[in-house]
Image (cartoon, coloured by chain):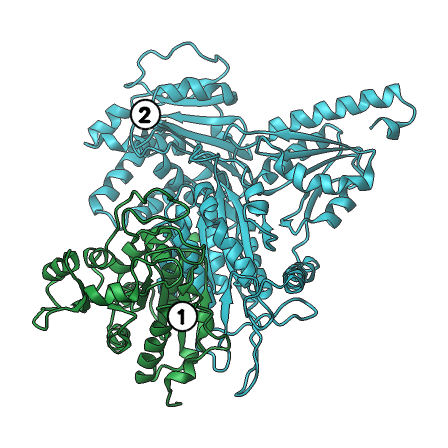
Chain colours: A green, B cyan
Amino acid sequence: MKQMEASDYKGKVKPSWCPGCGNHAVIMALRKAMAQLNYQTHETTIVSGIGCSSRFPFFMSTYGFHSIHGRALPVAIGLKEAKPEINVIAVGGDGDGLSIGGNHFIHAARKNPNITYIMMDNEIYALTKGQCSPTSRTGTITKCNPYAWTADRINPVLMALSFNASYVARGYSGDVKQLEQLILGGLQHKGFAFIHIISPCVQYNKVSSFEKIKEIACNLPSNHDITDRVNAMKYAFAPDGLYTGVFYKVERETYEERYKTVIRKAKEIAGDNYTIKDVIKQFQ
Amino acid sequence: MKDLRIKITGTSGQGIISSGDILSYATARKGYYVTTYRAFPSEIRGDGKCYYTLRISENKVLTATGDTDILICLDEDTIYECVSKMSNNGILIYDSDLVPNLKETRDDIIKYAIPLGTIAKKLNSERSRNMVALGIVVGIIKNLHLEEQILKDIELRYKNKSQQIIDLNKEALNAGVEYAHTKLERKDNYDSAQMQSTGSKLIMSGNEAIGLAAIAAGCRFFSGYPITPATEIMEWLAKELPKFGGKMVQCEDEIAAINYALGASYSGVKAMTATSGPGFSLMQEAIGLASMAEIPIVIADVQRCGPSTGVPTKTEQSDLFAALYGTHGDCPKIVLAPMNVADCFYQTINAFNFAEQYQVPVIILSDASLGPRRECVDLIDLEHLNIVNRQKPELKEGDVYNRYQDTPTGISPISCPGDLYGEHVVTGLEHTQANAPTPDPEVHRKMTEKRFKKLETAAGRFSKAKTFGDEDATIGIISWGSTSGPVFEAIKKAEEKGIKVQALYPRTLYPVPTDWIKNFIKNKEVIIVIEANYNAQFKSTIVERCTHINKSAEVLEFLKYDGTPFTPEEIYDEIVKVAKVQEEMYSISTNKHTHF
């Protein structure tokens, strides 16, 4: 098996993100984390939906599935369930994962498939040139809401915790070192790992800039118990700071493991040499 | 009597479906042909009415519609509703405990007022009225010798419940049989009903046939969301797929269901989903993704009345437009229409073969009159099924692999995660042969053509259209899907009366089977297009593309959109009507072609 380096994961296409976009840091961090685990390109698939960050698979040398808006998680889980030996990483933005694809986030978390989901949150729809997303701040002005954005924002980390995602972390694009560690932890975690990354848009979002995020970001206290979900929720709620780090990590049976029980039970009834000819007996 | 129609009716929760199922299994196992039709309300219990029709015959039959010979009503309302559609000398069996005074109704039928409730009560099981009634029927048609088989079938059906339930049902059946033999003053001659048993047959529903074929074709992944009347496919595969190491995954909605299946298929595993109208609408965007990204996928749409929620339990063939045009963009796909339960099996095998071979979404259009209905199927030769797998590239280190390589057939070999040197990104964006996204006009034009080229390659390899009737007939019927049973019988009846009719069933609806249709209408003077929808969807999208070949042929439509399936009688009447007009036109003209 080839010993992989971060640069081995560079795809045929160069990242088309704007210079200064937070996503450059995310792809670097992911490549480094994958190299640490020696992920082979042919055994890894990056799945995405639609959006700036969803162009991700094209910039990698692994298998990739650039699907439709909001559907990265269903495609990723279907792939993982059908072929559990593949490393599956779903990526996408806040609009893709929290708005059009929000429903899938709930069910992915509770099913606990052994995949990693990286959400690059820039608080805006950037590919369509700047409209409000579910994480945009109330009052934001865009072309679609020239007077004021009237909805409240949602809190992705709090959502993931309440849906019972088994690994929940947050980082931001200004700290690649931490990102690498958070992603590495997610990849190594057995179960649904959700990594929320504040990844500023330099083009359409002047409010949540690198500078601003840097001001409010702080590490979770070192004594935070990552098995304490309620306490993790308190940190996720914190109004005065943006906590980064691992909020929660508790391993439980994955979807694939639970399905093994289903297959075992079915095979107990059917026997080992069950063929289509046996199936047909019920119709005779 | 070689052909017997039995109808069991009542209110939801009275065990109509159970008794109908038990009777149909037993008749098939006894060696007779049987086909059924089930209509039931959306509510599980309550005021909704259930109807279970069985037709038992010594010959192959493919429709249960038509006049009822023996009607069993477990409630009062359905008596008055259903007696009008009984044959002369038919038998009505009803519960005299429930209906002490039967309102005046047809006097050309035989009425047996039987205290079903009292008999059941004596067994301490009022809920067994259905089995008592079934016993009465079995006692009446005693020369079909069904009793023993039904007892076996009761055991099979309730084997996962308690012995007490099995015993109660058996006792109720026996009580009914005994009543028919000893207490019933017979006024009918159904004792004479005898049929040749021709050996055990397979009996399955259209939905089960799709599930069975999926497994036989190598499908090992199904993802779905419950929806009437398609859920049975999912339930059946949930039971069977894990026995083969496969998976049935229940999703949060139909959008997730089809995208799970696409993810699974991309990984190299044959995958499918099944749904009905509302779910089919939700799946459209992903069908386009499958078409653009060239990912094999099979989607079974068991149609029901629409639009919107419509009538969930009733049948219609009104999703054809959605199947053909539901997805935005130029979207190559294949649409198949099985004609009966056996064809559900073979068309599903085809669906997987086409999906894998041509890397397109394949849609199977079944419907509510076909999916849930149980019917005899001739034995299936599992040894000689032609199963096709997707074409894989042969790659070695250093090779450049273009996922969307243009080829003379349009088919590009497909690698999947896990395959060395085959890494690539699939996308719903327009892309080059090397799977790089691009808005280049030349690329979009060429790649659109490349994707459609696959359909041209496929066109020559579809299963042949089915025709029946006299090929010299000047009256033609073109129809699709589940109407085939009643059409077949109507044509037979017309022939007996001296009217020649030929019918055409193109089992592939898209790509449009123009060659078959053109060839068929060449010598026809009148064409009747029969389908169960208001818009004449099949006629306007498919048949009318071909009629220029014979401009003198008149193209009529015969439509039904009340949620019930066509009956042979309705179609026969339409044939007679058309034949009459045709005759009149002959008599006023010396040149028939200018007038028709």
Q: Nearer the viewer, residue B595 or B215?
A: B595
> Mark 1 belongs to which amino acid?
Ile
Q: Is residue B76 above or below residue B515?
A: above
Chain under callout 2: B
> Mark 2 belongs to which amino acid?
Asp
Q: Secondary structure at mark 1?
A: strand
Q: Which residue is mark 1?
A: A46
Q: Where in the figure is residue B359, as x and y percent of width and height?
A: 57, 63
> On the picture, is B100 further left or further right than B68?
left
Residue B47, labelled with which disc? 2
Q: Where in the figure is residue B440, as x and y percent of width and height?
A: 62, 64
Chain under callout 1: A
Q: Nearer the viewer, residue B344 or B265?
A: B265
Q: Quadrant of the C terminus of chain B?
A: top right
Q: Give the residue furthest to the left.
A: A223
Q: How much space separates mark 1 and mark 2, taking CA atoms?
A: 52 Å
- State the residue at coordinates (49%, 25%): B189
- Picture quadrant where residue B463 is located: bottom right
Would you say residue B328 is visible in this rendering? yes
